Amino acid sequence: MADGIEVTSLTLLGRAQANDEDAWHQVVHLYGPLVEKWCRRYGLSEEDAADVFQETFKTVARHIGNFVPGRSVASFRSWLKTIVRTRTIDYLRKSKRHVDAAGGTAAQMRISDLPDPLAEDSEDETEADDALVVHRAMDLIQGEFDPRNWSAFEQVALKGRAATEVAAELDVTPQTIRQANYRIRRRLRLVLEDLVE
Amino acid sequence: MAIPPTKLSTCPPNDVLAQLVSGSLHEDSAEHLFEHFEGCDFCQNRVDELERRPEGVLASARTKPRTTPDHAQLEKLIRKVQNLGPSEGAVLSLPQEAVTVDSFVAALRRCGLFPVEEVDSLLSDLKADDSTSIAKQLIRQGKLTPFQARVLLKGRGKGLVLGNYVLLEKLGQGGMGNVFKAKHRRLGRVVCVKVMNSAGRKSPNMMKRFRNEARTVAALSHPNFVVAHDADEAEGVPFLVMEYIEGSDLAKHVSAHGPLPVKRVLELMSEAAEALQYAHDQGITHRDIKPHNLMLSEEADSDVLSIKILDMGLARFDSLLSDNPDAATHAAMTNTGVIMGTVDYMSPEQALRSRDADNRSDIYSLGCTLHYLLSGRPVFEGDTVMARLVAHREIPVPSLEQKCTGAMRGLDAVFHRMLAKKPDRRYQSMKEVAADINALLTGRVPVAVEICPDAEGSILEQRRRCRRRPAYASWAAVLCSSCLIGAGIWVALPDAAKTAIQQHAQTETDTAGVSTDMEIQPAAKEGFAATGLAFPVNFGGGNRLLDGGDGRALAVLPVGQFNDNEYQKLKRQLDTQNIDLIVTTIRGEQPRPAHDQKLQIGLPVPLADVRADNFDMIFFVSGSTDEFQSKAATQTLEPLINTAIGQGLVVAALSQGALQAVIGIDFYSRGAPELDGNVTTVSPTGLNGWIVHAQSAVQTKELVRKAKELCEETANGQKFGMSGGGRVATRFNGFPGRALVVLPDQFDQAEFRALVAVLGEQAIGFEVASSRWGQIYSLDQTVKRIADRMLDEFAPRNYDFVFFIGGNTHAFTESEPNTRLRQMAARGLEAGLIFSTTSASGHELMDIADAYANCTFENVDQITIAQPHTSPGAVLTAESPAMMKSLVNRVIVMRDKVIERRQKK
C-alpha cells in the first residue's frame, strides 16, 4: 500500500467514478477490445456484437459510480464480464421474440450455452484477458515517456533483459533505466489499479 | 510500509523492493531507495533481477504478447461509446421519462440559469428533435451540468437557483435535505449548499434542527471544522452555505483504496480528537462522528492533508439544554430525526436515548471510526440494524490489533477504552484520547494500558478465561469486558471479595437489563437472532421450524395450470422419505391442477416469502411454466436460484416443460450437463451446488433419491456444516426458538423491552418486522429504529411465535399492511404458529381475526388463552409488561402440548 493518502493520484477507476470524462475515455479504451472479444466468444455476429458492446458500456456508464472493487464481485473484470453476459442474454431474448417456435428453441439453446462469467476461467484465459488490457494501457501511456526510456522498459520488463545490458546499449547509466522503469510501472499501476487485480 | 525520510543505511527488505518493482511504492519512498542503490551493488542486483521477472499484470503482458490487431471497426465502436461519458450515461438513462422539447425549453426559460434572451440564442444554434439530445449538446458546450440537465429533463426548473447561488451538482442526500455543490453568481465562489427539502420544511422539528446546525457551524471557528459562509432563505426555502471542500470523505477513501496505514490513521484521529475537544469546549457535542463525516482536505499552501469535520445536523449545544426551559422540546427534536445516523458508529447510550449522548459518546464514535479506517469494516456486523444495535450494547469489543498490520502494542487498550460500554469507563475527554494516541505514535505507553493491562488480551482469550470458570461465567465476562479486574487477580481474591464483586456485577447486569455473557458468532453472523445468548436455561420444544423431518423441499408451481400428477408423485416420494414439502407460487395464488380438479394442496406461500436457505431442495413443477419468465417472476426466481446454488442446494426441474421454463433463468448453463442414467446431474465447476433434472415425470423417484443422496454427500462432507438431511434443522441448532416481533410505527417501548428481555432469557432469537418503511419509534420516543425490513420479507413458517407489539396499531389496519397481515395470519395459523399480541392495546389487531376464521386450524388444537372477541385461534394477551414473562412461559408449555398431541396422532 502506498504510504499516506494521495488525493491527487486518484486511480483511473476513482476518476471515472467521479464523472471525469478523460477517465471514462480511458476505461473504454482499455476494455473495449476485451468486451468485444467476449461478445464474439458468445458467438455473436459482428453486427450483434456491436449492439451488445454499446449496451454493455451504457450499463457500465450508468453504474460505474456504484461499483466497489472487492464487494460483490472480485474485480472490475468479472463485473464487466457479468454485464456482457447479461446484455447478451437480453439481446438474444429480444431477438427470440421475432422468430418462430423452432427459432425460440434455438435461441434458448444459445442462451443456455453461454459460459458462466463467474465460473473460473482457466488461468491461461485470464492471463490473456489481462494481457489485452495491459497492452492497451501501455498504448495509452507510452506517449508520456521519453522513447528511449520506454524502449528500455520494454527490453527489461517484457523481454527480460538485464538493466546493465540495456543501459550499455542505450548509452545511459543503469540507474537511469531503473528510475525510468519505476516511473512507468508506477504510472501503469495508477491506470490499472482497482481494475486489474 | 513506511520508509523513514532519511537515506537508508541498511538494505530494504524484499517486500519493499517488490513494491518498488510493482509500482505500488509511493514516489517519496522510491526516491530514498534509489539514493540507497547508488552505493549498494547488492541491492542493484536484487532490483534488476526483480525487474526482469515481473509479477502480476506485466507478467501476463510478457507471456501473452499482443495478438489481436486493432481493427478499425472496433476503434470506431470505442469512440462511439467514449462519447457517452459517464455523466451522459446517467442522462441516457432518462430518455423514456424525459419531457418534450417544449416543456424542456420552458423549464430552461424558467430556471433562471440564463437570461431569457440567451436561451433563444442558445437554442438557435442547436439542431435536435428531442429534449435529451438538446440537453446533451448543452452539456458538451458547458452550458449545463449533467445534474442541471437531469432536473430540466424532468420538466422542473425551479430550485436550480437559490438566491445568489447556482446549484451545480448534487453531493448528497439526507433525511431532511440535500447537499449541493454551488457557485455564487457574482463572486464566482464555489460553495457547498445544504437545502431543506419540502418534507423537512413541513416539520417544525426539522426546521429547528436545521437552524441548530446553522448556529452550530457558525459557532465553531477552527481549521478542522467546515466554515459557514451564510444562512439564508430563498422563496421560503431555507439553506445553509458552507465552505466547499475538495477531496473525499474517509468512508469513500477506504472503500476505494482499502484500509490506511496505522500511523496515518492515528495522526488523523489525533487531529480529529483535538478538533472535537475544541467543539466540546464550546459546549457542542457532535453526535454523528463517522468516517462519512470526516473529509480529507488539501490545505491551500502545503501538501499536507488535514481533516475537516462535517455535518453538525445532530449536534447539541449544552447551553441550550441547561439554560433553556424548553429543553424537553429540544430533546424531542433530536429524537424524532428522520435519519438518526448509522448505528455502526453510535454509542450504546445514544442508541438508547439520544439525549443521554454527551461528549463521551463522540469518543465512542471516534473509536468505531478508528476501527473502520484500520480494518475497512465496522466494529460489529450483523444483517439487521437491531442486531448491530444490540451488539454495541452487549457484545465485547473485538481486538483491533489482529485486524491490521503494523499495529503497535497498546492500540487495543486505547481502542477498548474508547469503546467501553459505559461512558464512565471511557476516556473522559477528547484531550485524553489525543494524548494516548500521541503516546502510541511516539512509542510511549498510553494511559489506557496502565489503567487496564488486561485490555491487551484478545477477546478470544477473555472468553476462554470466562469459560474456564463456568460458575462465574457471566460475572467474569462483565469484569473482563469492562476492564475492572484481570482474570489472574480473580482467582487470588478471597471469597468475600468475590461475593462483593459478584453483587456489584449483578447490579450492573440488572441495570443493563440483559446479561453480558454470550457467544457472539452464531447469532451475530446469522443476523436473525440479535441476542444469541448462550444460557444454561434449556427447555425442549422450540422445534416447529425443525420439524421438517429429514429435510425440507420447496415446490414452485405455475398458477394457470400445473401438472398435478407430477406434483403428487413428488409429494408421495418426499413423504416416504420424511421430507417436508412446501408449495410456492409467484404471488401465493392458488394454482389450478391440470387433471384432478379436486386436489387440495393447501395455501401456497408467495415466492417473495421464500428464503432459499430454509430449504434443502427446490423443485420446479411443469405446467403453464411460461409465467416463470415474466419480469416479476424472474426478479424473484433469479436471486432465489442463485442463493440456492451458492449454498449447495439441490435445484431440480421436473420434466422437460419446467426445464424449459427455468432455462430462461439460465442456471443450467453453469456447467456442461453429464448424463447419469435417466437423471441428468449437472455438477458445475466452481460452484458447490448441484442441479438435477429428470426428463419426465416418471423419473421423479430417481430424481429425489439422487437429490437426497447429494444432500447427504454435502452433509457428510461438512461443506455447509450440515448433518442429516435437514440443513435447516442444523442451521438453527442451539436456538430453542425463533420469534418474529411486529412493530407498528409508534410502539409501546415497555412492551417491546419486556418482550426482548424475556425472549433473550429463554434464548429465543427474534427478528423485527414493521408495517412501514422509515423511522419508527416508541411512544415516549426514547427508542428509535430504522425500519429496514418489512412484513413482506418474513415468512411466518420460519418462526415459532409472532408477537404484535402494542402502540399505534391502527397502522396495521391500513389496507396494505392489513392484507399482508391477514395472509400472514392465515398461513401462520395453518402452520400451527402461535400468534400473540402483547398487550391490551394490541386488541385492535383483532381486526385481523377474520383471517383466522378462514383457516382450518388443523394444527392449532384450540390453544386459546385470552378470549379475543371472535377468534378461536391462538391469541394471547398480557395486560402489562410484568405479565410478559409468564405469558411466554405459557406459550411454550402450550406449544409443547400441541407438539405432543400432534405426535400422538
Image (tube, coloured by chain):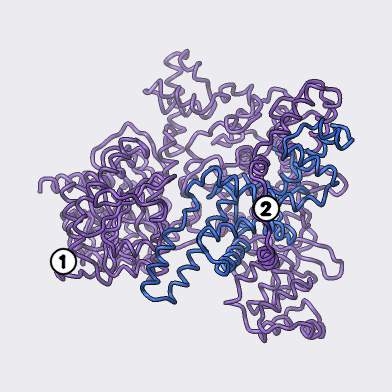
Chain colours: A blue, B purple
Horizontal and vertical percent position of residue B614: 33, 49
In terms of depth relative to the viewer, which is nearer, B356 or B174?
B174
Q: Mark 1: which secondary structure?
A: loop
- Left or right, B138 with respect to B356, comes to right
- Amino acid carrying label 1: it is Leu
> Callout 2 environment at 10 Å: few (<14), some (14 to 19), or many (20+)?
many
| Residue B726 placement, left or right of A39 | left
Q: Residue at x 70, y 85 (%)?
A: B106
Q: Which mark is residue B476?
A: none
Quarter of the image where the N terminus of chain B is located: top right
Taking B488 as reference, is B413 above or below it? Answer: below
Chain assignment, label 2: A
Quadrant in the picture for residue B518 = top left
Q: Residues within 10 Å of mark 1 (few under 14, many from 20)?
A: few
x and y, in percent, of residue B331 in the image: 58, 54
Residue on which the image places disc 2 = A13
Q: In this rendering, is residue B133 above or below B547?
A: below
Return the residue at label 1: B599
How many numbered marks, from 0 up?
2
Q: Residue at x 79, y 28 (%)?
A: B4
Q: Is residue A5 visible?
A: yes
At label 2, the amino acid type is Leu
Q: Nearer the viewer, mark 1 or mark 2?
A: 2
From the top left corner, tell me how far across and down residue B41 is, in percent: 81, 22
Residue B808 in view (yes/no): no
What is the residue that sits farthest to the right in this orientation?
A171
Q: In front: B322, or B167?
A: B167
Chain letter of the residue beneath label 1 in the structure image: B
